[in-house]
Image: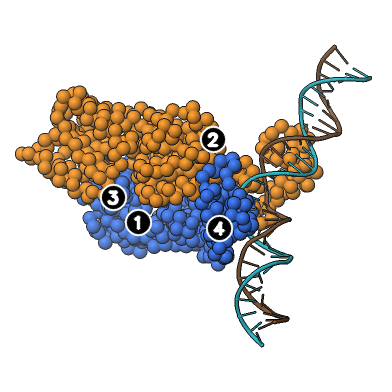
Chain colours: A orange, B blue, C cyan, D brown
DNA sequence: CAGTTTTCATGAAACGTTTCATGAATTCAT
DNA sequence: ATGAATTCATGAAACGTTTCATGAAAACTG
């Protein structure tokens, strides 16, 4: 059993079994072959320790059974979860995953797409940050959270609905003056609709609200300033906060506690994403949870569906409120 | 520019440029070629939108520039960090990463190794849980935290030293009766030396200590039982705890708080791994941090070093104590 | 049992690249 | 200006697989 420079090939197996090369191929691929032949070939494979060589097939068929996943990193727990579920979905279908971390670098996004194409991957799933990215047309391409055009399917959670849900939940829990906080520079992507949903719910409910949306790279102290600026008589102006992501929510809570403001007694807070710590069952904060598993499944089944033209261009999946201790229920 | 069924090949480029096929290959690979020829070829590549095809090369050279990384998952923040740094180290050397999640499933470990070999990866880095795993000899193989034999290089943190450091640090901070807690079933791997280091330090220091080591799959309530069993007069018998991993440490802290025991006032606690939350600078608990980046770098440079015979069979990297709020300093 | 259809093993071509021996053209030394 | 040494473009073979046309044998039909 070896894969080194002179590992046995199908030709060797054929010789050993006394059959034709094509017959070996059929046996290996499970195509219909006479029982006697099949057995001879299997015995020969066993004897030689033959190992299938994907390179040969890739060259001949132009298919690799590999999908490239382009994503900023795996440090952010939400991305980690996404990678995890996408991998499960791929494995189920006998595909492998070539993983590319961009670290939010737009040049890397471009380079990885090029690299993936050179490696003849069967498809690309990408969560990118360059709004002007050129999407190749000759390889199945699916985005997460970024809508480029109707010809590039985009899978995303119902971000608008999530923002709307957060505001309504806070109202239901007694809040009458809300705030929205977020950070991140791409304003045209799907997640930016969280704010829109939130705002439109506040308007519907007829309650006052504040909004602070910072660009990526802005120091977090700006949020601190925002919060202190809204303290009057030792109390926050608002009694409910919706934060764009759970990670930011976590940091906001730390700030609030340092300022002597109690969550959820003084102010209730809802995040977004639904990340959990250490495989714990409980989320880190009360949150609008993304249906990560469904998102992953949708990405994979879409990228693998041959007839991309029949695929919807925006696949929007429902979110869910989950209690995590930073609200009253 | 296309990679579809009839994308341009080197032959097409050669025809377009009016040169030989081999010349195109040399240009693409940056080998020495006359300036005039080089220019003609580059122009032709530009005109045709030629895209290099890795499959052809993989077949011809039996090299893919792909390394397989076999790891349980990316949910555990320590693994996520490891994947992250390994990928950086690979990218730096122009290698890609084929990622395989085992979910601690021993059959998957075996299947992925087989799959990786069929895909002719140039090497395998693996963090596995099957102590009887058969390591293929025909592909560079490096393990993390698992020592199989002198012919299979293993990269690991100084686990023994880490255990020793934890005990000494707790002693230095005033603790005079310690406890060690861990969970996990593979008792022969490198991380199991954390306990050995801890025990030997306690013996050296001449202080009493408790040990509870549970098998994987044991309900966490057993730890709860252990803790309550050591409460006398509302106080814990011991005043310092060393926990095998940060994730378990986190859960232990939750238990302690629920029992009305304060950390670090009533009992000081040190974990292991050095994980941080949400890209935060501060670790989750006081901890013995693994040198993740160095581990990643060592894995990659080892797996890529052709002359595996010259490589040490156990690469042991130094750990560091980091304060994270669950000790007094 | 003759004629027709079906099954299925065979052998060769093709996929796109790298690499090697060949020989033409150039450079250099004398 | 001649011969030797060097440079470097060329064309073809090889890597291991899939797939297709071919034809022999087996299975049906009436």
Name the residue at 39% across, 37% down: A148
In this view, the mark in front (1 or 2): 2
Q: Is residue B257 visible?
A: no
Q: Nearer the viewer, mark 4 or mark 3?
A: 4
Q: Relative to C11, say whether A168 is above or below.
A: above
Of callouts 1 and 3, the N-terminal one: 3
Q: Residues within 10 Å of mark 1 (few under 14, many from 20)?
A: many
Q: At 41% from the left edge and 60% from the top edge, which residue is drawn?
A: B294
**Horizontal and vertical percent position of residue A262:** 16, 38
The x and y percentages for residue A22 are: 73, 40
Pick the residue in front: C30 or A80: C30
Mark 4 vs mark 2, CA separation in Å: 44 Å
Asked if residue B89 shows in the view, the reply is: yes
Q: Are marks 4 and 2 in contact (CB under 8 Å)?
A: no
Callout 2: helix, strand or loop? loop
Q: CA distance from mark 4 to mark 3?
A: 52 Å
- Residue sitting nearer the eye, A287 or A144: A144
Q: Crowding near pointer 2: few (<14 within 10 Å), some, many (20+)?
A: few
Q: Position of residue B118 (x, y in %)?
A: 61, 47
Q: Left or right: B310 with respect to A8? A: left
Residue B280 has which mark? 3
Category of crowding for the residue at label 3, using alpha-carbon neighbours closer than 10 angstroms: few (below 14), some (14–19), many (at least 20): few
Disc 4 vs disc 3: Cβ atoms closer than 8 Å?
A: no
> Which residue, given by chain and number where applicable, does mark 4 sit on?
B40
> Same subunit under labels 4 and 1?
yes
Residue highlighted by disc 1:
B289
């Amino acid at each position: 059993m070896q894969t080194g420079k002179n590992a046995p090939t199908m030709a060797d197996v054929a010789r050993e079994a006394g059959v034709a090369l094509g017959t070996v191929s059929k046996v290996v691929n499970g195509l219909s072959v006479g029982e006697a032949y099949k057995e001879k070939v299997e015995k020969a494979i066993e004897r030689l320790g033959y190992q299938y060589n994907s390179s040969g097939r890739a060259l001949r068929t132009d298919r690799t059974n590999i999908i490239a996943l382009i994503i900023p990193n795996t440090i952010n727990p939400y991305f980690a979860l996404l990678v995890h579920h996408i991998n499960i979905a791929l494995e189920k279908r006998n595909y492998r995953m070539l993983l590319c971390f961009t670290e939010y670098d737009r040049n890397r996004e471009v380079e990885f797409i090029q690299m993936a194409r050179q490696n003849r991957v069967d498809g690309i799933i990408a969560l990118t940050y360059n709004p002007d990215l050129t999407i190749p047309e000759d390889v199945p391409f699916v985005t997460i959270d970024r809508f480029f055009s109707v010809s590039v399917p985009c899978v995303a959670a119902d971000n608008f609905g999530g923002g709307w849900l957060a505001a309504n939940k806070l109202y239901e829990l007694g809040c009458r003056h809300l705030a929205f906080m977020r950070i991140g520079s791409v304003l045209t992507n799907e997640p930016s609709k969280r704010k829109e949903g939130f705002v439109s719910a506040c308007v519907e409910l007829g309650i006052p609200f504040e909004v602070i949306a910072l660009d990526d790279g802005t120091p977090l102290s700006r949020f601190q300033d925002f919060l202190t600026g809204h303290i009057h008589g030792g109390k926050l102006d608002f009694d409910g906060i919706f934060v764009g992501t759970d990670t930011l929510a976590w940091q906001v809570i730390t700030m609030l506690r340092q300022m002597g403001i109690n969550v959820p007694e003084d102010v209730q807070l809802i995040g977004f994403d639904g990340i959990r710590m250490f495989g714990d069952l409980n989320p880190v904060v009360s949150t609008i949870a993304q249906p990560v598993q469904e998102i992953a499944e949708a990405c994979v089944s879409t990228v693998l569906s041959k007839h991309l033209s029949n695929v919807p261009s925006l696949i929007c999946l429902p979110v869910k409120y989950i209690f995590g201790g930073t609200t009253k229920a």
